[in-house]
Amino acid sequence: MNFIDKSSDFRKWLEGIPYEVAFWNSYYANKKRRKDLFQWSMYNKECKLDNFDIHNYIRGLEEVDPKIIDVGSALSFMFGNIINNKKYDVIYLDPLAHFYNKILDRYNIDRPHIEFGTFETLSLFYDENTIDFIHIRNALDHSSDPVSGILNCLFILKKGGILYLNHFVNEGENEGYRGFHQFNLKKENDCFIIWNKDTKINITETLNSFVEIKTELSAAGRLIVIIKKIKDLPETLNDFRRISKDSVKNLFDTIEYFYTLSSSFKYQFKRFYTTLGHKTMRILPYSILNQIKKLAGKS
């Protein structure tokens, strides 16, 4: 079942890579900003999630060492890996793992390496009904196909497993659909909605036969979606042939993109000016950065 035309969305996603890599490199390269990042990072800290008691959830599991994945983790390490006074080996997973691990090695950062994986193909990396908890923060709306990403998460979750989403509301609109910000997430009539200028999908209505979904806003106004798997998804929603086909197509779309001289030049130029821009931004005070962001959002 295809919800989204991925041919154009993947190209936009591909063009957003320089921005994302430059953003994290600028944070880790600047000692002051890196210190700020580690202060609000949750690595080696007690796990705290808005609107969900993960400590009680983990206590209720039969497994001694439940499997936990932070999908689309980037380099924020915002998922606390200490639960019920026990440190867990959380799997930090991201499609840009290759770039992020180079950043960790370059600055000799004492953090776990990121594992490679994509939302849209998780079912090719992990077996069905093997994962207990999946955490996604500020990342689902950055993917090229967020609906397929949710389906893949549900496939690998055990029955009773939780997919926890924590995102800004309508980030695509707020960011002017730049870089990875091609989709919006919102709550509408107690339903979880994914949308952009071309499509609108009611996830709650689409999956209500297989999951329990709770869609709320946190005290800070962030969108919190808690999805509990209650049944295995039908084969129509787990089409491995389609997933494999899409993966190969994305590979050749990438090759074609860089084979074209104009596209390759455009990508490298974007890499240059985003790197320069982010390094400059790390020097500026947060108050000025917020004003620049507001002005950019209006443009």
Image (cartoon, rainbow, N blue to C red):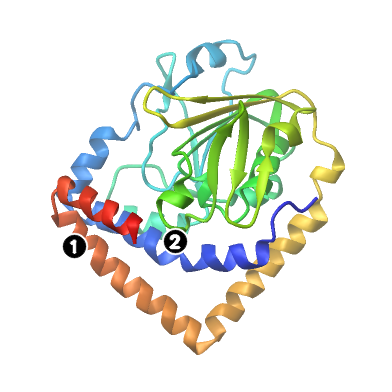
Quadrant assignment, res 220: top left
Helix, strand or loop at label 2? It is loop
Residue type, label 1:
Thr
The image shows residue 223, relative to residue 105, as above or below, that is: above
Query: Disc 1 designates what residue?
Result: 280
Quadrant assignment, res 265: bottom left
Side of 281 relative to 8 (left or right): left
Q: Nearer the viewer, residue 154 or 7?
A: 7
Side of 141 relative to 278 (left or right): right
Side of 155 relative to 49 (left or right): right
Q: Nearer the viewer, residue 158 or 178?
A: 178
Residue type, label 2:
Gly
Q: Nearer the viewer, residue 150 or 193?
A: 193
The image shows residue 76, relative to residue 44, as above or below, that is: below
The image shows residue 139, relative to residue 20, as above or below, that is: above
Query: Disc 2 designates what residue?
Result: 179
Q: Which circle marks residue 143 in the picture?
A: none
Using a 10 Å C-alpha cutoff, classify the residue at mark 2 as few (fewer than 14 neighbours), some (14 to 19) or many (20 or more). some
